């Protein structure tokens, strides 16, 4: 059983895609850019955080456009954000088992902090790190090491899990030498990538939802006992 679990945020612990996409659509329209369904195909690098994609989307207007995006998100986005299925139950289960909980995200910190409080007001997270918490964001391991900087046990795949929904998250877990868990069956990822990493050590674990991860967690406790 792990001593700590690190979670991604967007589409992992919380459904935020509607809030993100609606604010992107608003900003693209304001700057006279192509619609989102075109931009996401032509310019969106899914291996990078949204903020780092603004240069692709808006060129020399990227900084200004990002501020407009944040303003629109703050005004309209939070009402569209809610926990993913079975996430609350899984977090309570972890608390019962004294597993420390962390969030490492590439989201704007002010948005992230507000959404965490909104979705999980009763959950005690040891650290909540957003974009820019370290000089390098995911998939670099730096945010993981910063989140765990005060622990007293080794950082390895036995002690620490990372649960996320993207290649960024899985690459980050391997770079930090912790256990990678893919949530949502990797529907937006290359199947060859998933297969290849399921053969690695430690193997990539793939689950449909947090209910399945809860069952696996209980299994690890049974095996240990």
Image: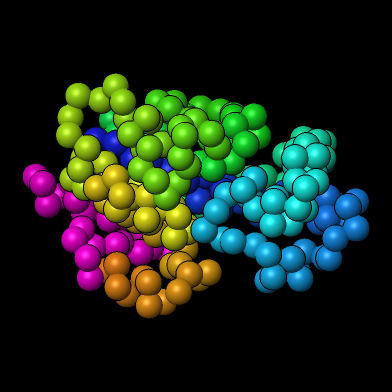
Q: Position of residue 35 (x, y in %)?
A: 82, 65
User: Is 66 left, or right, of 146 in this rendering?
Assistant: right
Q: Position of residue 187 (x, y in %)?
A: 50, 70
Count how many numbered circles sit on residues in the image.
0
Give me the residue at 57% from left, 49% from top. 49
Extreme residue toward the top, this view: 150
Extreme residue toward the left, this view: 225
Residue 105 in view here: yes
Q: In this rendering, is residue 144 above or below 43?
A: above
Q: In this rendering, is residue 1 above or below 166?
A: above
For the residue pair 117 and 27, the one nearer the viewer reads as 27
Residue 205 among magenta residues? yes
Query: Magenta region: which residues?
Result: 199-225
Give me the residue at 32% from left, 30% from top. 148
Displayed quadrant of residue 194: bottom left
User: Is 171 left, or right, of 155 in this rendering?
Assistant: right
Extreme residue toward the front, this view: 60
């Amino acid at each position: 059983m792990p001593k700590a679990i690190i979670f991604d945020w967007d589409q992992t612990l919380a459904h935020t895609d509607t809030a993100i996409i609606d604010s992107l659509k608003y900003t693209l329209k304001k700057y006279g850019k192509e619609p989102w369904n075109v931009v996401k195909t032509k310019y969106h690098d899914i291996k990078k955080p949204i903020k780092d994609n603004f240069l692709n989307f808006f060129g020399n207007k990227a900084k200004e456009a990002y501020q407009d995006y944040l303003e629109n998100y703050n005004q309209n986005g939070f009402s569209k954000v809610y926990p993913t299925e079975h996430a609350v139950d899984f977090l309570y289960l972890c608390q019962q088992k004294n597993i420390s909980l962390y969030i490492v995200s590439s989201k704007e910190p002010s948005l992230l902090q507000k959404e965490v409080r909104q979705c999980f007001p009763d959950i005690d997270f040891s650290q909540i790190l957003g974009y820019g918490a370290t000089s390098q964001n995911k998939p670099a391991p730096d945010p993981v090491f910063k989140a765990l900087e005060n622990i007293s046990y080794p950082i390895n795949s036995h002690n620490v899990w990372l649960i996320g929904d993207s290649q960024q998250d899985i690459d980050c877990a391997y770079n930090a030498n912790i256990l990678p868990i893919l949530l949502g069956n990797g529907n937006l990822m290359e199947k060859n990538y998933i297969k290849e990493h399921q053969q690695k050590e430690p193997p990539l674990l793939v689950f449909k939802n947090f209910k399945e991860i809860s069952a696996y967690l209980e299994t690890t406790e049974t095996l240990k006992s």
